[in-house]
Image (tube, rainbow, N blue to C red):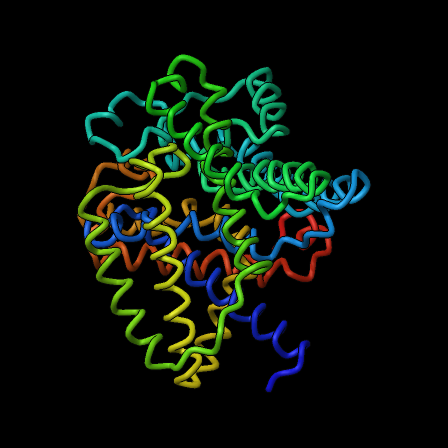
């Protein structure tokens, strides 16, 4: 029988390992490889919200003072790195255009890029000031920092959940929080379905928050109200195969993009993410049972480096694109392809390698800097 402290440590190690697996899938997903993107998109980002909810300390929703403490904590952990990385990419933007990592040439569009983010005009001083002010509110991420939208989403979702939980506590109905979360999910889905985000762009951010809050709530519910009994390892093997098959089947019906609020329908959305959760948990437990401690340690290490990987991986992709241009004798404008150029299975693995290990290398070099550890979460 485990003591309480041991249970907490095991839980935290498993969560970090799950985050590590998910950040690998995020980087791989951003290569848009046709053989795995549909599968990965169903749960890789959504589960980050669930895990964040699971780790949420309910003491932060007990009073106005505790909500203020939560605000200060989230400013340090989410707002500061978001603004810092966007500021860095902002001041580097014209340099990135000059060296070809971005382009202002219309020729770019003849190559049918995956996303338009590789095309932009040189930024002016006034434009830079406006962009910086927007970043203070988690608006308009710089090219290469697009993945950091998640930090803004998590920032607002955390407070929406905490404030709603605070109010429900006053009426002693906090256990019914999930009902309000379902209402927000359906409302966010209808805002998108009825085309309001095209008419009022601000509603896109609102919809992202609404459809993500239920994921945060689910994570919190699992921790607070669900007692998970010991499960024999055989069931994890069965679960791994079962959830894998379910996810493969679901991927034939569509993809999920929380950043674009593309969730098909609420039921598909929730079932996909929960199936992904079962898949990842089963995988962690199987690796744990096989006593592959070094692999779990690696996943756990990645799980603690999610912010620098999110911020830097698309920039690091350019190294692989440059190799492709040299190998295929391609036009130099292809270097601006965003986020990748050729994304066959092998090239996607190379993009994955660069997107993970180069940020880790940069992180290890800068880790002795207190500024980088505090501001950039290196």
Q: Nearer the viewer, residue 345 or 217?
A: 217
Instruction: Report x, y in % for residue 272.
Output: 32, 50
Judged left or right of residue 74, residue 105 is left
- Please state the horizontal and vertical placement of residue 119, each as a whole percent of the image: 35, 27
In the picture, the quarter occupied by the N terminus is: bottom right
In the picture shown, does residue 150 fall above or below 346?
A: above
Residue 108: percent from left, percent from top: 26, 27
Vertical comparison of 188 with 304: above or below: above
Expressed as whole percent of the image width and height from the top left, the position of residue 211 reads 45, 36
**Position of the C terminus by quadrant:** bottom right
Residue at 30 percent across and 58 percent down: it is 350
Pick out the residue farthest to the top: 199
In this orientation, which residue lies closer to the viewer: 3 or 183? Answer: 183
Is 109 above or below relative to 4? above
Looking at this view, is 241 or 369 the one in front? 241
What residue is at 43 percent from the left and 29 percent from the top?
188
Query: Does 182 sit left or right of 338 as displayed?
Result: right
Q: In screen coordinates, is 301 left or right of 330? A: right
**As drawn, 18 above or below 98:** below
Q: Residue at x 41, y 32 (%)?
A: 186
| Numbered-mark total | 0
């Amino acid at each position: 029988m485990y003591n309480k402290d041991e249970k907490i440590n095991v839980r935290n190690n498993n969560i970090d390992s799950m985050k590590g697996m998910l950040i690998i899938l995020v980087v791989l997903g951003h290569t848009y490889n046709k053989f795995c993107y549909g599968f990965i998109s169903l749960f890789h980002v959504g589960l980050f919200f669930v895990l964040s909810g699971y780790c949420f300390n309910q003491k932060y929703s007990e009073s106005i003072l505790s909500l203020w403490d939560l605000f200060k904590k989230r400013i340090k952990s989410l707002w500061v790195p978001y603004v810092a990385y966007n500021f860095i990419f902002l001041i580097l933007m014209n340099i990135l255009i000059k060296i070809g990592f971005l382009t202002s040439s219309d020729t770019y569009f003849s190559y049918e890029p995956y996303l338009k983010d590789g095309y932009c005009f040189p930024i002016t001083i006034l434009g830079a000031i406006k962009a910086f002010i927007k970043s203070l509110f988690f608006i308009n991420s710089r090219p290469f920092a697009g993945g950091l939208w998640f930090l803004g989403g998590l920032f607002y979702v955390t407070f929406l959940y905490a404030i709603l939980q605070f109010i429900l506590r006053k009426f002693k109905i906090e256990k019914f929080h999930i009902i309000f979360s379902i209402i927000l999910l359906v409302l966010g889905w209808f805002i998108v379905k009825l085309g309001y985000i095209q008419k009022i762009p601000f509603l896109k951010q609102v919809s992202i928050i609404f459809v993500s809050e239920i994921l945060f709530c689910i994570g919190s519910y699992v921790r607070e109200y669900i007692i998970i009994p010991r499960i024999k390892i055989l069931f994890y093997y069965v679960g791994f195969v079962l959830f894998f098959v379910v996810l493969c089947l679901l991927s034939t019906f569509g993809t999920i993009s929380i950043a674009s609020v593309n969730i098909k329908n609420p039921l598909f959305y929730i079932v996909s993410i929960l199936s992904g959760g079962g898949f990842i948990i089963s995988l962690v437990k199987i690796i744990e049972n096989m006593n592959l401690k070094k692999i779990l340690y690696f996943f756990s290490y990645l799980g603690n480096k999610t912010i620098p990987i999110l911020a830097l991986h698309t920039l690091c992709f350019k190294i692989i694109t440059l190799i492709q241009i040299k190998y295929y004798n391609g036009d130099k404008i292809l270097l601006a392809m965003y986020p990748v150029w050729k994304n066959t299975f092998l090239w996607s693995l190379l993009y994955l390698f660069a997107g993970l290990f180069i940020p880790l290398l940069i992180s290890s070099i800068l880790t002795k800097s207190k500024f980088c550890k505090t501001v950039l979460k290196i």
